[in-house]
Amino acid sequence: MTFKFKPVFRGTPGTKDGKYYASVSSYAKINEKQLAEEISNLTSLNSTDVLSVIEALLQVIPQNIAKGLRVELGDLGSFTISAKSEGKNSYKEITDHCIKATKPRFMVGKALKYAVDGIAFEQE
């Protein structure tokens, strides 16, 4: 499959300087119901049952990440939390007040990494 990209200018704030970068364009999207139908075609489950599992998965992943757990999805990858904190000069100065922001993080697994390795691109 060939992915489309377009050149996008990204300027330096406060100046007219900047450079053009390739920005990959998604040509379409797929939702949970469509995924459920595709999975149903590959299994003995009906699409309603698969959709119920997908919807449950979308609920339990955030719940488990919020508990501090790493959610691993096999070779697809894993979800966890990362934190941004301010630096201190000594170990003892680090407290929970040093943490300024948290965000969910997805670490790509082998299957997903190999799926996008070697894809072709063409300009829109």
Image (cartoon, rainbow, N blue to C red):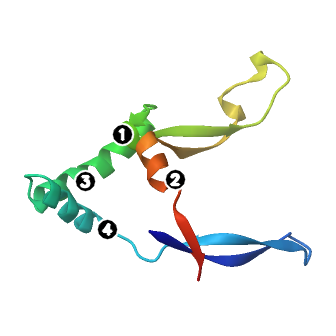
Residue mark closest to the camera, 3 vs 1? 1
Residue mark closest to the camera, 2 vs 1? 2
Measure how far apart labels 3 and 4 are at the Cα level.
11 Å
Measure how far apart labels 1 and 4 are at the Cα level.
19 Å
- As helix, strand or loop, the secondary structure at mark 2 comes to loop
Measure how far apart labels 2 and 1 are at the Cα level.
19 Å
Earlier in the chain: of badge 1 and badge 4, it is 4
Q: Nearer the viewer, residue 84 or 18?
A: 18
- As helix, strand or loop, the secondary structure at mark 4 comes to loop
Neighbours of disc 4 within 10 Å: few (<14), some (14-19), many (20+): few
Residue at left 69%, top 25%? 95
Q: Residue 28, how many percent across, how many down?
A: 41, 76
Q: Give the residue type at disc 2.
A: Asp
Q: Quadrant of residue 49?
A: bottom left
Mark seen at residue 73: 1
Earlier in the chain: of badge 2 and badge 1, it is 1
For the residues bearing labels 2 and 4, Cβ distance under 8 angstroms: no
Q: Nearer the viewer, residue 112 or 84?
A: 112
Residue identifier under label 2: 117
